[in-house]
Image (cartoon, helix red, strand yellow):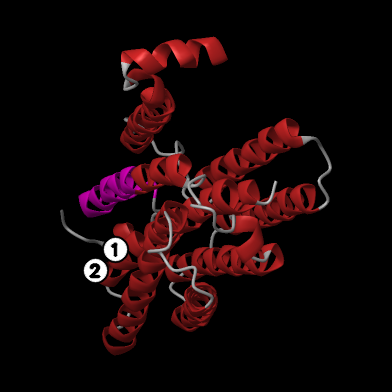
Amino acid sequence: MELTQDTILKEEHETTDTTVFGFWVYILTDCMLFAGLFAVYAVLHVNTFGGPTLKEITSLPYILSETLILLTSSFMCGLGMIALRGGNKKLMFIFFSTTVVLGSLFVGMEISEFSNLVHEGYGPQKNAFLSSFFTLVGTHGLHVSVGLLWLIVLMAQIQRNGITPTASRRLTCLSLFWYFLEIIWIFIFTFVYLMGFI
Amino acid sequence: MSIRAITSHIIGFILSLIITISAYSIVKNAVFDTTSLIFSIVLLGVLQAIIQLILFLHLGKESKPKIRLISFLFMILMVSIIVIGTLWIMAHLQYETMPPIDVNTYLINQ
């Protein structure tokens, strides 16, 4: 389908671009992946093999900060997309750079949390609860990291070639990806961390 | 830049912020008893997801045919079957795979 000015300027839910819809379907399949991981965690989180529960090895304020950081990065991504549609390249760069910074902060905090757990001896091989925990949260973190890499590359492309219809389509797909990751994190925050602290 | 788009994003962000902090406070201060606590944070989580789906992802706001919405609902159906099915089966495995002799002991203990 030919990319025109219309493709750039329309809201993402009104675009007739089939690539964006195809990416939406991919995101739905990614949700299936996470559903499986959530189901496994739901079954295995009680199997601590005499070890500590989530409450004893995590700090909820730390996780709250991570959550707020990711939420803000999602908001910045949205503002960046609005700037893109308005053709404002400079503003778009500012917003997406903020998204990268906040996203990197999130990943850094998560890596730090994992590394602390491993150093204390509570690595993914210790018991079933930790295996499922590391897999679920780690997969999400991996998705975020890849998304960050993608965003950085897209920014470099736009810096070089300006806002082309192709770049706009790619950014639309990336923003869908970023919102979806935020929604998955809501469920991780609710069902893994908050449930663990009840 | 569309004012409508900007406002929907800001509203979505602020609502999500409020819900996240509420859920955190409810758990941190143990405002309700366990069952109500679980119910309330699940409700808040689902609510926040719906808010983000509508206000950030504009789910369901497309023109007909609403193919995005339909495919999304299908995914929800599949996920429900997988998750509920898994929990149901795993919860009953202990009983289903018990040798007959132990079934008596199990039933007596019930």
Residue A15 magenta: yes
Q: In this view, does A119 lie above or below B64?
A: below
Image point 48% across, 47% down: which residue? Answer: A47
Q: B51 or A33, which is in the foreground?
A: A33
B85 left or right of A17 in image? right
Q: What residue type is labelled 2?
A: Thr
Percent across and percent down for residue A174 are 36, 64
Q: Is residue A166 above or below residue A6?
A: below
Q: Are marks 1 and 2 on the same chain?
A: yes
Q: In this view, does A21 lie above or below A109?
A: above
Image point 58% across, 39% down: which residue? Answer: B46
Q: Is residue A182 above or below residue A32?
A: below
Image point 39% across, 26% down: which residue? Answer: B94
Q: Give the range drawn in magenta.
A: A13-33
Using the rendered image of the protein, determine whether residue A11 is visible from the camera's viewpoint.
no
Q: In which quarter of the image is residue A2?
A: bottom left
The circle on residue B104 is none
The circle on residue A169 is 1
Q: Which amino acid does label 1 sit on?
A: Arg
Q: B14 or A2, which is in the foreground?
A: B14
Using the rendered image of the protein, determine whether residue A92 is visible from the camera's viewpoint.
yes
Chain letter of disc 1?
A: A
Question: Which residue is situated farthest in the left direction here?
Answer: A1
Chain letter of disc 2?
A: A
Q: Is the magenta stretch mostly helix, strand or loop?
A: helix
The C terminus of chain B: image quadrant: top right
Q: Do the residues labelled 1 and 2 touch (CB within 8 Å)?
A: yes
Image point 54% across, 75% down: which residue? Answer: A120
> What residue is shown with label 2?
A166
